[in-house]
Image (cartoon, helix red, strand yellow):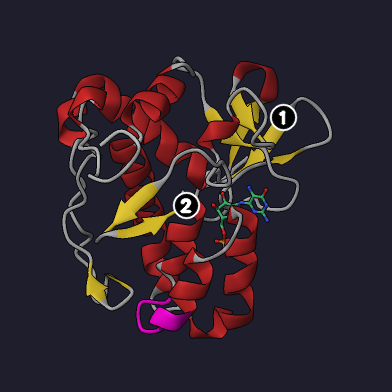
Amino acid sequence: MIDAHGNVRCYKRMESATFRKVSEKFGGLSNMAGGFPLSVEGVPVATSEALYQACRFPHRPEIQELILASSSPMTAKMKSKPHRRETRPDWSLVRVPIMKWCLRVKLAQNWKRFSELLLSTGDVPIVEDSRTDSFWGAKPDGGDFLVGENALGRLLMELRLKLHDAPEELYEVPPLPIAHFMLLGRQIGVVGRKVYPPVNEIPVPQGTLFG
Ligand SMILES: Nc1nc(O)c(N)c(N[C@@H]2O[C@H](COP(=O)(O)O)[C@@H](O)[C@H]2O)n1
């Protein structure tokens, strides 16, 4: 099934790695999944959903702050809703590259967990199974198929391919070459992997029970 732009795809559910709920086997691929914390320009960001929604409002750091303070990814999406009219004007042009960047940040900063999950999908199509959204996901057709643009699934497949072919090129995430790529008033630069010191090298503050 093809729309005017040739973008609508049709996926056989049984032959795809699908996710709707975050509790499902591939649920971690959803932007709504917890357990993949991020840090951009020193700002902690709980989920890729919060990061994506915050990117709508580079000129409104106070809206970004509200989104980033949300207690859940769905709340982050809901917090952005009343402010949608203030979304950056070029959003329809930049939202896919921004989502791609968010997924790369999620991978770079949660390397083991996210790369293993992504590679565990093998080489079958990755599809966000959505009741409502046939742009980021694909909707059930009432039978064996999911139909939609599946933009999120396609970005995840692209990332999976890159992870196979040149993982080292994914360790760092360059900023997008777009105007006003900002978080809380700071220009977003290169985002690196999170590096945790070995446990026995974590400094113990003096004056604690163990000091
Ligand atoms: N409403 C809703 N519920 C879910 O459970 C979802 N997984 C999604 N999809 C995600 O919403 C994001 C797109 O938001 P915009 O509509 O562009 O503001 C994206 O992360 C989808 O994967 N939505």
Circle 1: residue type: Phe
For the point 73% across and 52% down, the residue is: 132
60 falls in the magenta region = yes
For the point 72% across and 29% down, the residue is: 145
**SS for callout 2:** loop
Lateral position of residue 182 relative to residue 93, left or right: left
Query: Mark on residue 46?
Result: 2
Q: CA distance from mark 1 to mark 2?
A: 33 Å
For the point 51% across and 54% down, the residue is: 49
Front position in the image: 209 or 94 = 209
The secondary structure making up most of the magenta span is: loop
The correct choice, above or below, for 187 with respect to 202 in the image is: below
21 falls in the magenta region = no
Q: Which residues are magenta?
A: 57-62
Circle 2: residue type: Ala
Binning the other alpha carbons within 10 Å of mark 2 as few (below 14), some (14 to 19) or many (20 upward) gives: many
Ligand 1 is located in which of the four quadrants?
bottom right
**SS for callout 1:** strand
Which picture quadrant has residue 140?
top right
Whether disc 1's CB lies below 8 Å from ligand 1 is answered no
Whether disc 2's CB lies below 8 Å from ligand 1 is answered no
Which picture quadrant has residue 206?
top left
Front position in the image: 20 or 107 = 107
Q: Residue furthest right?
A: 142
Image quadrant in which the C terminus is located:
top left
Q: Which residue is mark 1?
A: 145
